Image: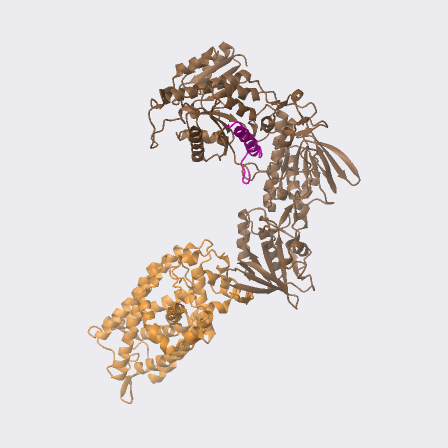
Amino acid sequence: MGNITKIDANLTAVNQIISAGGDTVKRCYQCATCSSVCPLAPDEAPFPRKQMLLAQWGFHEKLLSDPSIWLCHQCGDCTKYCPRNARPGDVLASLRLQATRELVPFKFMHTLYNNLWGLPILILIALAFILPIMFLTYQGVPSLSDPTSFPYSPIHYKIGFMDLPARVLMNDMIFLPLSVFIIAILANAVSRMWNSYLETYNIPQAYRIGCIDVIKTYFIPALKEIIDHSRFEKCGANSWRANPHKMLLFGFIILFIVTGTVFFLADILGMHTPWNPITHPVKWLGYIGGLLLLYGVIGLITGRNQAVLENSLRTTYADSYLLWLILIVGVTGFLIPIARIFTFYYNYVGYIYLAHIISVFLLFLSLIYSKFSHLVFRTTAVIFDLYYKDVLKKL
Amino acid sequence: MEKIGVFICKSCDIGNRLDITELEATAREEGITSVYSAEFLCSKEGKAFIDSKIQEDGLDAVSICACSFRVNYDVFNFGKVAVDRVNLREGVVWSRFPVGENGETLDDSVEVASGVSFKDELMALAKDYIRMSIAKLRVYKLPESFKPEEELSKTILVIGGGVAGLTAALECARLGYPVVLVEKEKELGGFSAKLKAQCQANYPYTELVKPIVFDLIKEVESNDLIKVYKGAALTSLSGGPGLYTAKIKQGGKEEEVKVGAVVLATGFKPYDASNLSHLGYVIVPNVMTNVEFELKAAKGDFTRPSDGAPIKSLLFIQCAGQRSEEHLPYCSSYCCLASLKQAKYLREADPESKAYIVYEYMRTMGIYENFYKTLQNDPGVFLTKGKVVEVSERENGKVKVVIDETLFGEKIEVEVDAMVLAIGMVPTTKDEAILNLEYRQGPALPELELFYGYADSNYICFPYETRRTGIYAAGAVHQPMTIDQVIEDARGAALKAIQSLTAIEMGHAVHPRTWDFAHPEWDLKMCTQCKRCTEECPFGALNEDEKAFPIPFINRCRRCGTCFGACPQRIINFKDYSIDMVSSMIKACVMPEQGYEQYRFLAFVCENDAYPALDMLAYQRRSLPVSLRVIPVRCLGAVNVAFIKDAMSKGFDGILLLGCKFGENYQCHFIKGSELANRRMENVQETLQQLALEMERVTIDTVAIDEIDMVINKTNEFVELIKSYGENPFKGW
């Protein structure tokens, strides 16, 4: 090991980490209790002891190109057992947020997403996208207090063989381009992430494999791990999180399937909603997904409050924001069919529908600008971890 | 003593396991008429009983046959009546049991030799102890405390005017003792007066404050009881505690001052950094010592020495020339704190600057952990463990440092504007005598070769003590320490100095035998000028005249009896402890006839640690061989070879000496006693071999106070070994 690394501590970066929620980072005195108690730290590259040191010295780039920060599920064991209350778990959470910021363009959006004062601006931005499309598809300004004007307007569009009601066209026009935008950004981010990991771990050229091979070999095992929550379940201090988080994930998966099915059945085949809310099987699947989502998110919110009392976790605005946003998506999602059953507030359905669209819009974007990005970035890190372990075996 | 009374206690199992009537008979056989036994001698009634018998029978000495002398010493105190304690409880009934093959306790009636029951042996032991006590009291004389003719001085001489010296002077003056303070430099304050700032010496220990030494200087200079000699040196110190004559040279003239006790507070010198060229000192221009950086910082100068450019990044190397056999083998304890402090100077002078600290062991003493935590939290302080491998100069004047074994797990290279070496402390006593004592054993404090030249004697039991009675060390000359610790240390040393003066005034010994009013006396008519006493005294209590006769200075004496043990002429004796006394005790034992397999062993046991260990094993009802007789001694150094001869010729089969550990991590309460005893016993063993006797018949062992198992094992092994050699062939001669 004759290699000598030239280093120069970066005071600016340290200050940045401190101001971004890593304010306890400097307290660490490198006893490595955190790495010892961490149920997730791999033997080959244990964390978070070293990450704490790198953060103390302001080695930003090194940190952000380290998959370890994503392998952490913030069980909070390290924070709970840290003799100096340096809160490694929280420091790593702040590093993940910074990594997200570095990987995704339009950084001002990240700022808006992670500060309370940014919330009204975000809603305005969402409206700025939604309203023009709404006015366009509804051919003017619909009345929000009249469900027959919005969302259930009789206006239909015939595009080719498809017959789309106004609200379906509106949703397609909002969310299809948004999805493309998000996917493009994520693809770029994941590719940059992967390459930086290869450099960080000095993977020899001979063992570097293409994108298709990575997905073929490691995506399914990684997915299996993620769905099983096998890493999450190893957590000590906050093992309660595994179950609600798993349910939340299942909720998302079911809702994703429901949305896909609806898109196929309604948009392509023309079997348009509103379907019968009591008898339709797809509706039922949707309810199950929605209930799992609500169960998960409420479990996470209450569990987190408990963990904060036990000093194993800290809840920042970024954490609350995402949880409450998901809660609002779930609640507004349920209120729409409920409104159709309990007709006494049926007239508010337009407002609820709009609120739902705004919250879903913000949730979509939060995939790249909030801690929600872990859905993709942690998956990438898990895939890399599996790949790296294989490479090590071969070496 | 003329009229001796023997009182036997029947309680605490003594009456159960021993035949009291038989014991009384033994005392009568020895010619004692006042023999009594009662329950609970230590009770109010018991004590009143003894008191009444002392009055009735006109006793001048009593032998209390009850518990160990280590307990109830306040109860068994009868003023002018001599008291000896026979340890029947801890020494006999609670520590001698017939033990079966599997470690079980058998009945006392079990046979231990043909026709001899354990009970017989136990009674023989108790009887021997009573006989020994009577023999002892017969030659015992009441101690007379030492009162010198000259007037005792109550002045305390403080050498050194730094934080330690100033604090000690103030503490003494506050208690009304006049102080003479000698400072080498032109001004008071010592090293800490040169500091830019010091770490807060009170809670929360997180801030920097103006050196507190300035307040101390003001207080000292305005105190009428303190006489300050600046720019002065102590050229000679003669006499002894209470009676010292100090010669102080100031300017061209020398003055003689009478002083009673001394606080040595001459502090430290920084380690000579020119030995640290491997860390770039002198070779790389921008490498400084922490002392040099401190002096620069005190002037507000945070620039590079080479070109005066501002220091934007500074790297501290901890343990520079420390914890290393080639340089200083120890930790100087202040340097981590000093580097953290200096990092704070830089960070406060320039918030954009960076301070790196490379340490092997980050140690901030006591609650200064708080200071470390505070500095750790400074974003611009970068800490890593590591070893410096290379220091070199770059073209731009920067210092390149390569560090290995870092927390990063790799070798790192850092380029900084300047570098500071955290060098250690060297005590001023390392190369200089300082005290300039006019003692036979030399002008300096004797070097133990354990404390690297520090004026330290024993790190656990006896802080502040030096091996010169009446002289107490404080501050960085005592041990490496921080200002905070120095203050505490100086208070302790001041108190010790005062304590020694009080002891001398009252006429008793100083620590560790503060109850002892007796002192050694020399019968010089028989002296052969062999110099053993003057050379071996661990405290240098003796000078010599021109004919090499010893001149004792009793005030310097700690009553360890090392001289008494050393003297081949047996002319050194205490009133209450003499060669004749111990010999009489040995001779008072009754030896069984040869050939009956009844062995007799004698143990000389040090009162400081080994004897308490015996008492403690008794409290746990552990067992010692019943054939072992114990004579407590004040130190193994006080075992005269004559005792060994007497015991061997009396017929003891083996002699065991149990004392404190010597050598590195020694625990000897008189520092050198057990070591000297060891040397003497080696000579004895040689003699035994010449007599065709097994050398193990005289064995010396060392134990710590808590090593009860070891005491038991060692005595049992010793007894078994000697039994395997057979009886002492001189038995019955």
Residue B265 against residue A258 in the figure, above or below: above
Q: Chain B is drawn in which colour?
A: brown
Residue B706 appears at what percent x and percent y? 46, 35
In terms of image quadrants, where is residue B430? Answer: top right
Residue B92 lies left or right of residue B59; in this view the side is left
Asked whether residue A120 is in view, the answer is yes
Which residue, as the protein is rendered here, is positioned at the far right? B252
Residue A359 appears at what percent x and percent y? 36, 72
Q: How many marks?
A: 0
In terms of image quadrants, where is residue B676? Answer: top right
Q: Colour of chain A?
A: orange
Whether the magenta-drawn stretch holds residue B691 is answered as yes
Residue A325 lies left or right of residue A266; in this view the side is right
Residue A323 against residue A307 in the figure, above or below: below
Whether the magenta-drawn stretch holds residue A237 is answered as no
Residue at x 61% of width, y 31% of height? B499
The magenta segment is B663-692
Residue B198 lies left or right of residue A152; in this view the side is right
